[in-house]
Amino acid sequence: MPTQVTLHDRIAAENVLQWPDAGETPLSLVIGKTAEFEAGAEGLALGYLSAAIKRCSSLHIHCEFAFPRDDNDFCGTLLSTMFGYALLRACATAVFRDSPEIGATELRKFAGRSYDAKRGVIGLGDRVGILAFDPKRSIPRVFDTHSNVIATDLPLPSQFASGLHRILSGMGLGRIASQSTLPTLTDFIYETFANTLQHGRPHDARVARHSTRGISVTKIVFNAAQLGRRDISVEMREFLTRIAEMEKTDKDRLLACISVMDMGEGIQNTLPAESAEERPEDRLRRAFQLRQTRKSVSSVEKGMGLLKVVEAAFRLRTRLQVTSAGYRLVKDFSLGEDKMPTMDGAVLSTLPQQFIAGTCVDLFVPVLFTDVDQRVLAL
């Protein structure tokens, strides 16, 4: 019997963790028209998919809506996400409510045209992704100044900054794309995306040919008085409530969740062990320390990549969340209790066996009315 996962309405991380282990059976994903990921949940879902592709006998999509007529139709569904693209690339069959005969091939063609037309930027409105898929599109064209050339090398940080500024400003997140914050965000995104390119490609051949990596940005607009009535997870509601209390204003508040994810082997599995006794979870913690590296000896700033991630989270006073091949590591710098950018005190949890692949680094960035450089608030 096939294993079925149903995706309806808002999908939080706690919902994804309940998805069953398909083992070696066929896996069928039933997708509703209103299905969407809560901020911070998509990377976990992508890791689940990576592990499933490696083990399950086949993958199938059943959409409870019509085949998209145009790009707006497509971008309004869960298919136009990092997870959705990885799913449609790997599926054996795809069935829609009105067109069961169209199938996976036509869906892939449609999604590919949409991807190319937008130079690797997917989604719209409050949810935008910047997508790379291996081996043909390893660098999204939005970061490449040569529009007619498919880039294979990591672009310069300045190209990242330019592309990010356009995307964030277009989402109404210009405050975190300001001169005071954009360099810090660029460091975070550049280093984590570089890690997906250099270390985030799956070793298993079945997964590698569908390897999907990239950057996802979710904008959350919220009002403190309405949080109790919103359909969000308890964890997210508690975080947003605390953020709302940091500025006493009647205005709506903004939060940007910036996620960088891949379908690879996980941070701890690509960092050499210091000893035979070192546990994987200890290796994951160590990866965020100074002079710990997975890069070649020729790297100019050897060992600085993941430390820059921690420095960015500390600098912006954000919540940093890392899922890595079976583990989840959370450090909340927004509490304002840290004097130095370290992962000391980070909370580590072990995930079920169906999440033994993939990496996602989530940065929850509150968009404050007070300039981040003033550092007046405990944020």
Image: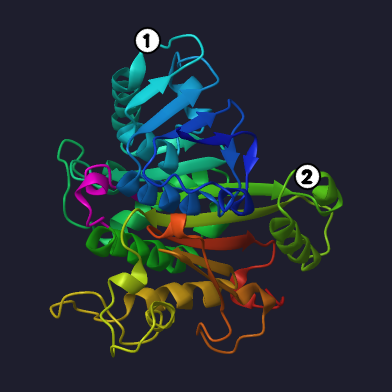
Above or below, 325 against 115 in this view is below
Which amino acid does the dot numbered 1 rest on? Glu
Q: Whole-percent x and y of residue 236? A: 69, 57
The local secondary structure at tag 2 comes to: loop
Where's residue 144, x and y in %? 24, 47
Frontmost residue, 260 versus 327: 327
Residue 376 picture quarter = bottom right
Place of residue 279 in the rendered image (x, y in percent of width and height, measured from the top left):
39, 82
Classify the position of the N terminus by image quarter. Answer: top left
Q: Measuring from the top left, give residue 356's x and y in whole percent.
A: 40, 60
Amino acid at pointer 2 = Arg
Q: Can you identify the residue that label 1 sits on? A: 101
User: Closest to the observer: 49 or 23?
Assistant: 23
Instruction: Based on the picture, tell me whether residue 43 belongs to the magenta stretch.
Output: no
Q: Residue at x 35, y 42 (%)?
A: 56
Q: Is residue 208 magenta?
A: yes
Alpha-carbon distance for marks 2 and 1?
Answer: 38 Å
Left or right of 256 in this view: 145:
left
**197 on left or right of 60:** left
Q: Residue at x 26, y 64 (%)?
A: 199
Q: Is residue 212 visible?
A: no
**Magenta-drawn segment:** 201-214
For the residue carrying disc 2, how many other residues have a C-alpha within 10 Å: few (<14), some (14-19), or many (20+)?
A: few
Look at the picture and state if 230 lies above or below 246. above
Which quadrant would residue 249 be assigned to in this image? bottom right
Q: Which numbered marker is on residue 230?
A: 2
Q: What residue is at 39 percent from the left and 35 percent from the top?
A: 26
